[in-house]
Image: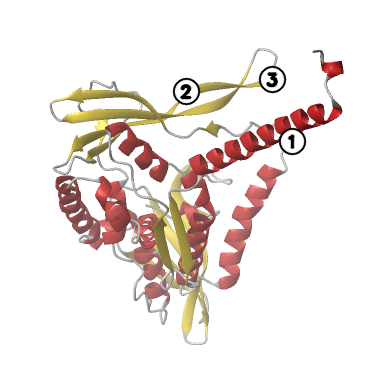
Amino acid sequence: MTVKQLPKYTLLFAAASLLVFLLGNTVRSQSESAQQTEPLLKVTASGDNLESAVWTWKATRAWKRSSARELASDYLELIDDHSGTGQAQKPLRERQDSLRAAYFRAALLRVVNADYLAQLEKSTSGQQEDDKKKPAEQRPEPIIHKFEITKEQADGAGTWVYFEAKRDLPRKDSSGKWKFETDVYERGRLLCVTQKDGAWAIDRDELGYPGSAESDPNGWDSRVRLWQMHYDVAIENPLKGFSPDTTSPENCATALLANLFFLERLQLSSWAAGRYTAGLIPLLKPLFTESYLKRTSDEVAAAVKNTTSNPEYRQSLRHSGVDSVVSQGKDVATVTFKPAQKRRSKWVIDLKKSGENWSITCISIANQERVTNKESGQETTEWVSKPVESMSNLGP
């Protein structure tokens, strides 16, 4: 019987059946896709400042630990910012960054004049806006892909699971058009071992140094991820109780150099990250062996002690004490610091008094330069000061 000979109801039934089949498969495909991309973690936030903020973590299912590959797949999904789980956390990571920036700004305003700080911020944001206004010919953004497992390799210690993330980099071809070339952005390996209950756990997590060979035992860094999370949780807030003495220009300027430079910002970033991930560590604990957790805890304790126990060393990187305090009227002064032992430049801080307190109105870096006298033509060496363009210039 040909199609033309089939009754109309038979054709309608066949068409309806085909539609149901297609819709069913479409829904199932969408459902399977949703299951594959559903984040493994959910996190909620409360609190309106960095000190009061609390991030609450919840796993959406049990971790898969029946094989080294399953364990590694779950772990990579958790730690990868470019995975579905990582992308779901992006708004909260941005919120945490915003709270940290506001917290640091509030500390700066205790010693830095508000108008001057706004000027520095405007200068920095203005440069960023100029970059945005550049012609569309500007270089396209690189594309970073999620982690992928590349191989498994068993040895006497357990099973090593190797992984990497690739990156598409824009390059101009001979015609001047942008094209993407792919390279390896990051690579690592996990040592997975079986536990007494038969489940797998991670005993080492290592990041490959750029350019190092896979077989090089010194080509892997073990102080990553789990180590960093424990360090961030253990580190102290460098600005806790920050209450600078601003009753004299010398004390106000010294407070800036002692508390608000690059190393303190790094420590503050770690402390802020620790507040974000503190609730995550207990959830991840089943993924690791007890011995790995113990080794990490011991290493972190030593690192934290080294970070926080030597403030004199930090000062020695910045200056060797106050060189001079020059008053320019009763409400304006300039504090100049002696160069640090390993630096050829020195800090010059301008301040203004308002009421009983001083605040910083300009931060400059002075360097020795050869200057030619216009009248005699002779060259002399003089200190020449140039104002910093943004707070990022304050280092180390």
Identify the residue under disc 3: 177
Residue at 68% x, 37% y: name it.
23
Task: For mark 1, give the secondary structure.
Answer: loop
Q: Is residue 77 above or below residue 250?
A: above
Foreground residue among 116 and 235: 235
Q: Earlier in the sequence, mark 1 or mark 2?
A: 1
Q: Which amino acid, mark 2? A: Asp
Disc 2 is placed on an element classified as strand
At horizontal 46% and vertical 75% (from top left) the residue drawn is 110
Pick the front one: 164 or 30: 30
Local packing at callout 3 (Cα closer than 10 Å; few below 14, some 14-19, many 20+) is: few
- For the residues carrying marks 3 and 1, which lies nearer the camera in this image? 3
Q: Amino acid at mark 1?
A: Pro
Q: Nearer the viewer, residue 213 or 393?
A: 213
- Discs 3/2, front: 2
Point out the tag, 3 or 1, that comes first from the N-terminus. 1
Q: Name the kind of residue labelled 3 in the image.
A: Lys
Instruction: Tell me the mark number nearer the camera, choosing from 1 and 2.
Output: 2
In the rendered view, would you say 220 is above or below 334?
above
Q: Which numbered dot is residue 135?
A: 1
Residue sitting nearer the eye, 368 or 187: 187
- Specify the label residue 119 is tagged with: none
Residue holding disc 2: 183
In screen coordinates, is 389 left or right of 237?
right
First-in-chain label (3 vs 2): 3
* On-image quarter of the N terminus: top right
Q: CA distance from mark 1 to mark 2?
A: 27 Å
Cα–Cα gap, marks 3 and 1: 15 Å
- Mark 2 residue crowding within 10 angstroms, few (<14) / some (14–19) / many (20+): few
Visible residue check, residue 14: yes
Instruction: State whether residue 311 is above or below residue 198.
Output: below
Picture residue at 23% right of the left edge, 35% below the top: 192
